[in-house]
Image: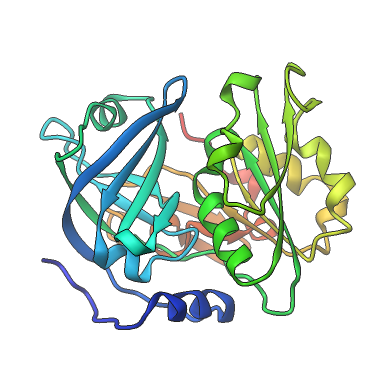
């Protein structure tokens, strides 16, 4: 068991830490059994794992590093998608894009997976806010379900802008936390507004006190270029390749206005306007 620091507390304490923005750094290595797995969209899977130590302290926006079989040397990072506090379960949402995620998609109930986490920093909700705007591009919904649930439990209002290429790639509404207002957009117009999800921002930005986003870098670039977000606090979850997850290998270093930062240790949550987008290298 790898336990870098000891932390105690109940789940309500965890939510208070999220709101107040204090940092909790506790990382455990655990062998977690698979509880269930389902394909929720074509090529996109939702897997539930039993992991009491991680569930106890995990915050929205944090991630876990998984060992995806003996043939995959490096761990893979996955955002924590949902929690079931009562049953000590956490959910991961992922699309099959390579050997590691293919291996994960083949796991069955009872199989055990080596997890390291929770890692990184989480989204920060200002206690003075009331209206939270969540922006998800495709599989970017992964960390935002956890955030929406936590926000709603703390009596914040949450509106989710959910975008995808086509209707079949939209996250199912019945899996969203109860009380989430969801507005959809598809590039081909098969559901919701036709166009990019960022096209919806002008309609909702005045309502929001804070913006939280997760999606491809192209979505972030589009958001950064819009003047309407200049004075609106906007946090994003940055996706880059990671080697270790601890800030040792420097493989996930990005350039920011305050210098070089490591996504695994200083992120994955950053302020949108802190990233030097003209020097950001997209994942290939």
Q: Please provide percent x and percent y for residue 261.
A: 48, 61
Please name whichever residue, 113 or 231, is drawn nearer the observer in this view of the structure: 113
Q: Please provide percent x and percent y for residue 188.
A: 73, 16
Q: In this view, does 7 lie above or below 218?
A: below
Point 14% across, 39% down: residue: 111
Q: Please provide percent x and percent y for residue 94.
A: 41, 35
Q: Is residue 244 above or below residue 9?
A: above
| Quadrant location of the N terminus in the rendered image | bottom left
Please name whichever residue, 212 or 56, is drawn nearer the observer in this view of the structure: 56
Point 57% across, 33% down: residue: 172
Instruction: Report whether 242 appears left or right of 107.
Output: right
Point 41% across, 52% down: residue: 80
Instruction: Report whether 80 appears left or right of 104.
Output: right
Q: How many labels does the image show?
A: 0
- Which image quadrant for residue 230? bottom right
Please name whichever residue, 14 or 199, is drawn nearer the observer in this view of the structure: 14
Q: Is residue 135 above or below residue 248?
A: above
């Amino acid at each position: 068991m790898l336990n870098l620091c000891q932390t105690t507390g109940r789940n309500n304490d965890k939510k208070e830490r999220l709101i107040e923005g204090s940092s909790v750094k506790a990382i455990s290595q655990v062998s977690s059994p698979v509880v269930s797995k389902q394909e929720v969209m074509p090529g996109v899977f939702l897997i539930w794992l039993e992991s009491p130590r991680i569930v106890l302290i995990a915050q929205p926006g944090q991630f876990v590093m998984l060992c995806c079989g003996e043939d995959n040397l490096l761990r893979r990072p996955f955002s924590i998608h949902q929690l079931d506090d009562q049953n000590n379960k956490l959910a991961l949402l992922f699309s099959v894009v390579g050997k590691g995620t293919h291996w994960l998609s083949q796991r069955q109930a009872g199989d055990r997976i080596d997890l390291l986490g929770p890692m990184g920093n989480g989204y920060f909700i200002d206690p003075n806010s009331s209206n939270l705007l969540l922006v998800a591009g495709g599989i970017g919904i992964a960390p935002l379900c956890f955030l929406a649930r936590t926000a709603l439990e703390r009596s914040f209002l949450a509106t989710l802008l959910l975008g995808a290429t086509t209707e079949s790639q939209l996250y199912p509404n019945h899996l969203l936390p109860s009380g989430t207002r969801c507005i959809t957009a598809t590039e081909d117009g098969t559901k919701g507004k036709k166009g990019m999800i960022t096209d919806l921002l002008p309609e909702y930005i005045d309502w929001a006190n804070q913006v939280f986003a997760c999606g491809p870098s192209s979505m972030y670039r589009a958001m950064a270029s819009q003047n309407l977000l200049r004075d609106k606090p906007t946090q994003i979850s940055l996706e880059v390749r990671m080697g270790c997850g601890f800030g040792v290998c420097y493989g996930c270093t990005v350039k920011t206005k305050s210098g070089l930062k490591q996504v695994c240790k200083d992120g994955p949550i950053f302020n949108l306007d802190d990233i030097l987008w003209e020097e950001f290298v997209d994942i290939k």
